[in-house]
Image: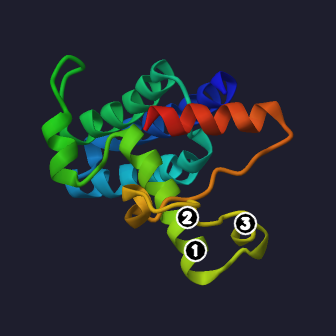
Amino acid sequence: MEHQVSKIRSAAFLRIRLIARVRRSLRRNAARILVKSLVVSYLYFCTPLLAGISATSLLRLQQILNAAFRLVYKRKKRDSICDTLKEEGILPIRQLIDLRILYQLHTIISTGQPSFLHRLIKPCEPQRHTRSEEQKLLHIPRTKSKNLRTSFVEYHSST
């Protein structure tokens, strides 16, 4: 997974460098639109694939967002950017990954599409009455692949 994170970082920082070349001739709003359309949308597209990555990799991906919005608001490297990200409505990477996965699950459950994924998602039906019955939990499927089982358990335990 580290290799994919490195590829995402290099592509995103290339886009940031290209925006930085023309930043002086752009107004803040135009720079913000460029960053959101080229950098943030790229990260949003990749996030569902990054479930279960290490904290170090999450930090490396968060640095992309921080650098992009430092460029827009002309902040120095050591300046805090957290408040700016909140104002822009940009979630931290960890929350973004969770949100995207939950959104995809909701879409699959509500529409039934794609059917091959809908068949895999089953509600957890305990054999006896439990308090967690009202939480509408999903059944964790058994897999033959050790890698799939390990990645699901790692993601599930980290949330």
The label shown at residue 109 is 1
Whichever of labels 3 and 2 marks the residue nearer the N terminus, that label is 2
Disc 1 is placed on an element classified as helix
Q: Nearer the viewer, residue 60 or 145?
A: 145
Left or right relative to 67: residue 8: right
Residue at 44% of width from left, 48% of height from top? 98
Hey, what amino acid is under mark 1?
Ile
Q: Quadrant of residue 36?
A: bottom left
Q: Quadrant of residue 62?
A: top left
Q: Are marks 1 and 2 in contact (CB under 8 Å)?
A: yes
Q: How many numbered marks, from 0 up?
A: 3
Alpha carbons under labels 1 and 2: distance apart: 6 Å
Left or right relative to 141: residue 56: left
Residue 156, horizontal then vertical, whole percent: 53, 39
Q: Nearer the viewer, residue 47 or 72?
A: 47
Disc 3 is placed on an element classified as helix
Residue at 67% of width from left, 27% of height from top? 1
Residue found at the far bottom of this picture: 111
The label shown at residue 117 is 3
